[in-house]
Amino acid sequence: MRPACSQEDSATHGSPIEEPAPATVAEAFIERAGRPQWQSRLASLRAAPGGSQAGRAMLRRYAAELTIERLRQVSGPAPLSPGERALLGLAAMTERLFGTLAEPGRVRLEAMLQEAMAEGGTLIPLFHLLRTAGLQASRGFAVRFAGLEQGAPFDLLLSRNGVEAELACEVVSAEDGRNVHRGAWFQLVDRIDPELQTWLAAHPGRYLLKMTLPRGLREDGGPATLADLHGRISALLADRRRSDQDEAAVLRLDPLLLVAAQADELGLMSRLRREFGPEAHLAVTSAGQGIFVMAARAGQENDVAAAVRRRMEAIAPVRLTGTRPGILAMFVEDTDRAEWQGLRERLELEGETRQFLTSADARPVVAVSCASRLELFGLPVPEAAPEGELRFRNPAHPAARVEALAPSILSSN
């Protein structure tokens, strides 16, 4: 069986072949994913309250599914955005891959799709795998989907000029590095917002509630649960107190003194972000001329890059065999553009990755790459990594200077 992804895939033989219409590609992908499961996913997204913080976050999380559904409804040729083209290409690649795999591989690929369609799942792990395979093929590697074809612990087997390397794709959530989870914050804001609007109507003015949460805030509970924090905010407002403090949370209510804060929420949020920094969780409630701002921080800085390192330490010994040079392709999920840019510009990902590469767990690893949704969707924005990924070579690995591997292991900065 020929490799599922190789340089031949992008070659043109004879006359040009007409590209299938976006709707055709989208329909075929949805059929593969399972139409009942797809419709169930869409129903849950349509039911998400669009005006709520949690609802908007859910729509962002499932942006790939919503885009494919939108493309399914496109009749005839249409100009596509970079993100739409990228997702359409990944959907088409899924169908092509089914045609190259033997039965065991098709069963495993179907299982990946079913996991993506299950409650809480997304298409990101599958699309990260497919995009990584395509990226390596574009660099001149023959690519086999060894994880699907043979049940190997790694995902892809790369070969170039007689040299092979194993590649494992992994998705890690930035939430793993946050003490105050964004999902929990969005739920808190949605819970308290109606009360704040009522309170503002009775107490017109501009207010700022600053919260420090030393023990964090998570959807799965903990010392500062959503219900506890909601209750404390409600009591603070009802009793007209200015502060409330214990080991789980420090709350302080003050006048909002930002000079000439813009009236619209977007402008105010921009001012607040500059005031409180990139790690603060912010929310604005307005009623009439009244404005109520909530700003929350954890008791310590986020350690998203450290969470990525911890995942690499956990997976390298079990996902790579050590018989060939190994590459870890890490996808950092649940970040926004500003956070991803900060992780890169402050060299946090580089620092934690290079620390990992000095550990015993990294012995089979010749290189690590990191990417986000910006790169996956091919968005032409300055926050995206120029080469489609951040890449860090392990200079201590015996294969670090093997020329055949250079396109996939040389550091990108």
Image: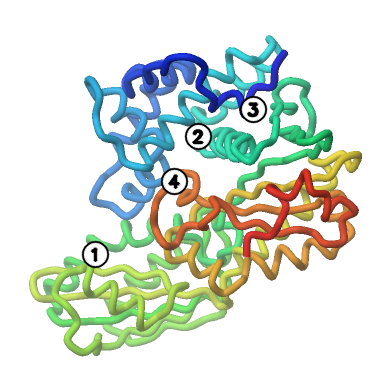
> Which residue lies under the disc numbered 3?
6
Classify mark 3: helix, strand or loop: loop
* Sequence order check, earlier mark of 4 and 3: 3
Residue 351 appears in the rendering: yes
> Which residue lies under the disc numbered 2?
123
Q: Identify residue type, mark 2.
A: Leu
> Quick check: marks 3 and 1 in contact, CB under 8 Å?
no
At a point 19% along the width and 71% down the height, the residue shown is 199
> Which residue lies under the disc numbered 4?
378
> Quick check: marks 4 and 1 in contact, CB under 8 Å?
no
- Give coordinates of residue 255: x percent, y percent: 25, 88
Residue 13 against residue 394 in the figure, above or below = above
The C terminus is located in which quarter?
bottom right
* Sequence order check, earlier mark of 2 and 3: 3
Q: Identify residue type, mark 3.
A: Ser
* Sequence order check, earlier mark of 4 and 2: 2
* Sequence order check, earlier mark of 2 and 1: 2
At a point 70% along the width and 17% down the height, the residue shown is 2
Classify mark 2: helix, strand or loop: loop
Q: Nearer the viewer, mark 4 or mark 1?
A: 4
- Disc 1 crowd, CA 10 A, few/some/many (<14, 14-19, 20+): some
Q: Nearer the viewer, residue 269 or 342?
A: 342
- Disc 4 crowd, CA 10 A, few/some/many (<14, 14-19, 20+): some
* Sequence order check, earlier mark of 4 and 1: 1
* Sequence order check, earlier mark of 3 and 1: 3
Q: Nearer the viewer, mark 4 or mark 3?
A: 3
Compared across the picture, whether 179 is left or right of 353 comes to left
Quarter of image, res 87: top left
